[in-house]
Image: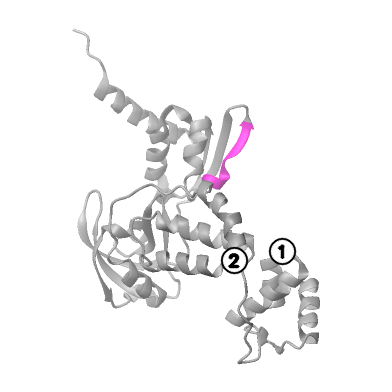
Amino acid sequence: MRRVDRLIAILIALQQRHETAQSLADKFEISKRTILRDMQALAEMGVPLYAVAGPKGGFRLMEGFQLPPLQMDTQEALTVLFALKAMIRMADTPFNQARFTIMDKIRALIPETTLKQIEPVLEKLEMDVPARSFKTPHLTSLLALMSESKWLEVYYRSANHQRWLHILPKRIYAANGFWYCEAYSLTHQEYRLFRVDRFDRIRETEAPELQQQDQDPISERNAVPEGNNPIRVVARLTYKGMLAVEQDAHIGELVRWISDDVWEVDFPCPASEWEWAIRFFFSIGLHAEVMEPEILRQEIGQLAKQLYQQYEIKIT
């Protein structure tokens, strides 16, 4: 990034929030010393900056200072339009109307020469989002309540149950064409992942007593019950197996290449996710072979025997 572009980006960031020299250095992937030189340059240009000391301190702009309207360059315009194009592929979002109108507004702001450069790229650049047919009527309310750290009672339809659950949402994200809510479930006494389109009703509720305990039971994601250490899982993968594992949100980045057409995934599996590990590697079939632990191999082998017996051809 050119220095002049970085100086403008720093000003834009400071208009939104205060920033420390370290946070800016991390954002622009440069040294803290370079950021301090940039701040000095901005001050010499007459930008009304001041610094606040302390844990919540950092650089700030004097109240009332505003940058004039800025033009997006080609790469910035491509970034924004690509992100919005990907969102349009979602079946339902909290931003259904805004996602279309904002694209028109952005196109209206972009110079015609820039549009001619990015449109051919946008036509061939896609983010794969499976087509789904579902509605998430409670997504907007869920987002608002989660931002306030509210405990909720939700009526949830899973594969096996329809019942009220007591949850504290932690984050909401889109993946595989669905919206997911990661939350601590008081019913299950652990973190669980819920599909938002399966929430039939939600309502705010009082925080349970456990919220007042000295040790916060929801402070760690995928917490393992005391005495249950994570179990190391190692699996060899074919090319198709590698593609399947790479798409998993939790272990996908741990896949590594071993040799021609052989990959491996090596990860600590929490005891609470043991059933998931059995089902996951069984579903990949011949494109994955669990090398260890032996007990996981045996569990998958038992499922394979049951499947074989179900489809065994009986010769009479």
Q: Is residue 265 left or right of residue 219?
A: right
- Residue 173 placement: quadrant: bottom left
Q: Which mark is residue 29?
A: 1
Assess disc 1: are there few (<14), some (14-19) or many (≥20) residues with their C-alpha within 10 Å of its C-alpha. Answer: few
The residue indicated by pointer 2 is 111
Q: In this orientation, which residue lies closer to the viewer: 21 or 299?
A: 21
Residue 149 screen position, x and y as percent: 39, 75
Going by the numbered disc 2, the residue's amino acid type is Pro
Name the element at disc 2. Answer: loop
Which residue range is magenta in the image? Answer: 252-258
Quadrant holding the C terminus: top left
Q: In the picture shown, does residue 120 fall above or below 147? A: above
Which residue is at a point 57% across and 35% down the rendered structure image?
264
- Residue 61 placement: quadrant: bottom right
Name the element at disc 1. Answer: loop
Q: CA distance from mark 1 to mark 2?
A: 29 Å
The nearer-to-camera label among 1 and 2 is 2
